[in-house]
Every structure is written in structure tokens, then in C-alpha cells.
Image (cartoon, grey):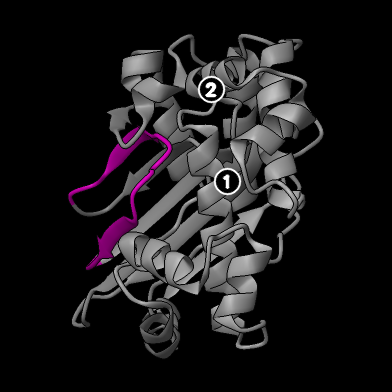
Amino acid sequence: MRRALPLVETRPIGNGRARGLVSSRASGRRVESRSYAPSEAVHDVVHAFWIGRWDLRDQAPHVTELLSDPCVNFVFEEGGRYAGSRIVGVWTRLWQRTLEGKGHVRGIKLRAGAVRAFVETPAFHFANRIVPLSAAFGREVEILRRAVLEPEDDGEAFGALEAWLVARRLHTDDGQIALAVALVDRIAKDPAITTVDRLAVVAGLGCRSLQRLFREHVGASPKWVIRRNRLQEVALRIERGDGPTLAAMAAELGYTDQAHLARDFKSMVGKSPSDFGLSVR
């Protein structure tokens, strides 16, 4: 019998849901989603294990819209046209996925910058792409897929997935991976980092070296990562309804002015900040 992983559910950072979700809250309540903290064995390269389940037969589909983190996911799904296993690279556009019928997905969200702990391919090759997991790991993936999707218990499924990750890990002491992970974490935690120049100073790297590091290990530029983090923050504050004015947010987050923030937000989310505030409920 496989070892079941003790699961500790993580609380969403957003307003009662995952940070970055910009789709309808009311519609999203029809989809079960949970995330679990990784164990000590993989916590340096894994952000979370996660699941999604839905049964929308005889109901309208749900459209998930997400300003995703700069993370690569390994995903295992059954039910519908997306059944199978895949690598989902860093998504620099608005992530959209229509959920319909009945489905079940389990996945692992790697920490931003950590994908090369498991594959030799540079991270930018996966950007805005969905690649069969077998393209990186071969025929063993079919056995893994069954081990992840067949158990009813999430702990057993993720125990099998974690054991596989530990066995397939290529690097355990790669300083470049650790640096990439640390810098993306720093962007998320330090509101003073609003420019690539500031991040380069923090990293102790020249801008070109910083760009190469992010291209190889994150899959997106440092400028994009900074931008995505602050757009997630804007969406979160608007949804909560307890943030400062748009002009104050623009000044705090390094935008030229309120109009600059509004244009940036609309170009990514497809709605103005005010329209988003009304539509997300």
C-alpha cells in the first residue's frame, strides 16, 4: 500500500479564494478546489499540491480566469477532452479554462524558478505552452497518472506524486535554482521592488544576468513577474473593497499615474478596474 501524505490545507491568500482569480465568485462556488502544503522533502521546490473537482452536468459551464503566478504546474486530469497528464508552463496572458460536464484534476504547483530541478529544458521553452508530461518523462508517466488519479484519498495520491518527484529530482544543491526561487519570493513580499533595476540591486546582479536567470529558470522576464505581482495585488484589493483609491495604489505600486494602472489592468484582465469590481461578485 502506498504511503499517504499527511495533508495540511492552505488558506487562500485572496478574498476567500486563491490570489489571482478574477473570474466570477458566484459561478466558481460550483467548483471544489483545495490546496495543500508540501512536505519538508520537497518544500524548497514545490509551492503546493492542489485539486479541482466539478460536476456541472445540466448546468452552465464555469469559465476560470486567472492572473496566474509565474509557476510551472504538473497536472493530471480525468474526464472530458482534457483528460491526461501535462506540463503547464508560466502563462503570461490571462489564463482561461472552461469547465463543463464532470471532471477531476490533481496537480502540483512548483515554486516559481524551480522547474529545472526536474527537467533539463530551460523554463522559457514551456512559457504559454501545454506540453504532455510524457514529453519530459517518457512512458513512466502512464503509471504515475494512474497512481495520482485512481486513489479516492488525496493524501494517497499526493504521496505517490511526492515519491515520484523525490526520485526524479535532478538537482538538490543548484544555487541558480535557489536564487531564482528566492528572487521571485522577494518580489512577492517586498512592495519596494517595482522595477528591474531595484531587483538587480537586491540580487547583486547586473540586469543582463538577471534577465538570463529568469529566462532559464522562471520562464518569464523579471519585468513581467513584477508586473504580474502588482496586478494580482490590485485585483485583490479591488475585490476586497478595503484598499486605497486607485490613484493611491498606482503611486504605491510604481505606476506613473492612475491612468497607467487602469490601462495595464484592462490590457490583462479585459475589464477596467471599476468594471472588474462589479463583475467579480
* Image-quadrant location for residue 260: bottom left
Residue 154 spot, x, y in % from top left: 59, 51
Residue at 47% x, 48% y: name it: 106
CA distance for labels 2 and 1: 13 Å
The one of 247 and 62 positioned closer to us in this rendering: 247
Which residue sits furthest right?
A: 40
Which residue does the image show at 56% across and 79% down from the upper left? Answer: 246
The kind of residue on which mark 2 rests is: Gln
Q: Is residue 204 visible?
A: yes
- From the image, tell me which residue sits under label 1: 226
**Quarter holding residue 238:** bottom right
Task: For mark 2, give the secondary structure.
Answer: helix
Amino acid tagged 1:
Ile
Please provide percent x and percent y for residue 150.
Answer: 44, 44
Count neighbours of disc 1 (C-alpha within 10 A) and say few if under 14, some if 14 to 19, many if 20 or more.
Answer: many
Callout count: 2
Q: Alpha-carbon neighbours of circle 2 within 10 Å: few (<14), some, or many (≥20)?
A: some
Residue 228 screen position, x and y as percent: 51, 51
In the depicted view, which residue is nearer to us: 220 or 40?
Answer: 220
* Identity of the residue drawn at 34% across and 54% down: 95
> Is 18 rendered above or below residue 15?
above
Residue shown at 40% from the left, 61% from the top: 264
Give the camera-side residue of 187 and 171: 187
Residue 91 lies in what quarter of the image? top left
Drawn side of residue 12 relative to residue 31, left or right: right
Q: What is the secondary structure assignment of the residue under circle 1?
A: helix
Does residue 204 sit above or below 130 in this rendering?
Answer: above
Residue range (magenta)? 81-101
Q: Earlier in the sequence, mark 2 or mark 1?
A: 2
Find disc 2 in the rendering and name its residue: 211
What is the quadrant of the C terminus in the image? bottom left
Q: Are marks 2 and 1 in contact (CB under 8 Å)?
A: no
